[in-house]
Amino acid sequence: MTFLTAMGYYGFGYPRYGFYWDPTLILVLIGAVISMWASSRVQSTFRQYSRMRSASGMTGAETARRILDSQGLYDVQVRSVRGNLTDHYDPRSKTVNLSESVYGSTSVASVGVAAHECGHAVQDAQGYAPLNIRSALVPVANIGCNLSWPIILIGLLFGMSQFLHLGILLFSLGVLFQLITLPVEFNASGRAVVLLDQLGILRGEEVTAARKVLKSAALTYVAAAAATILQLLRLVILFGGRDRDN
């Protein structure tokens, strides 16, 4: 197999349909559109409810501390990190990390996001199985994602179907990670809304608004999973049957 023929398979086209036209690229485009829509949705929803101040006047940082203390998680620290919507919980350092736009803000959106990250801390403390599985998958998924495309390219350049299949298998680890992320994120949001209501941090319409913010944020994970699945489907269509084609 020549280099140009290999590139026909890898990036530009599947010879069965023509050198420069690869109809499976539509799967990638669909995934990209879904991801852009989800990102736009979460940004617009967050901006909308960033203008809605919580009646309690609690900031994101104060909300996080209140929730953590209510669950007996006194050892979990709340920190401010740079960036926009870079909020996350780190189970290794036991820290709830809130972005600058969330940490000191009293908006319903910020309170909701802070509560969501605390939901992950509660999951960690209670040994929530999907979170443990996801944490265990992180290094494996990272290795799989980093090695999958180089291995696929090697398989194409040298006509080695075993490498193509190995590359697809490694890429599927990323898909598995995205899928296990979904219940983790939805569960954390569910915990957040319940705690915000129970502790009186938000009330009435504020709880509904926070739920909308977290729902839109969850869509980004759904979109990421969908895009990764579509990419995996494309790889299977293009390379999964190479033994038969040869």
Image (cartoon, rainbow, N blue to C red):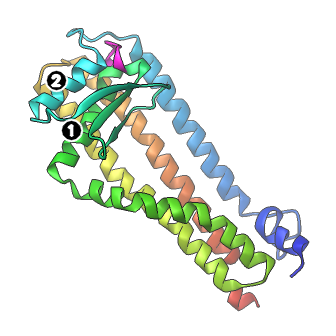
Q: Residue at 59% across / 72% down in the picture? A: 168
Picture quadrant where residue 140 is located? bottom left
Look at the numbered disc 1 and give the secondary structure of its residue.
Answer: helix
Mark 2 crowd level (few <14, some 14–19, many ≥20, 10 Å Cα) = many
Picture coordinates of residue 192 (x, y %)?
23, 33
Q: Residue at 15% across / 49% down in the picture? A: 126
Residue segment shown in magenta: 103-108
Residue at which label 2 appears: 66
In the image, taking residue 9 as reference, residue 175 lies left or right, namely: left
In this orientation, does residue 240 appear? Answer: no
In this orientation, does residue 75 appear? Answer: yes
First in sequence, mark 1 or 2: give its number. Answer: 2
Q: Does the magenta stretch include residue 79?
A: no
Disc 1 residue type (three-letter): Arg
Q: Is the magenta stretch mostly helix, strand or loop?
A: loop
The CA distance from mark 1 to mark 2 is 14 Å
Picture coordinates of residue 70 (x, y %)?
10, 30
Q: Nearer the viewer, mark 1 or mark 2?
A: 2
In the image, taking residue 98 as reference, residue 204 lies left or right, namely: left
Which label sits on residue 191? 1
Disc 2 residue type (three-letter): Arg
Q: Residue at 17% across / 31% down in the picture? A: 68
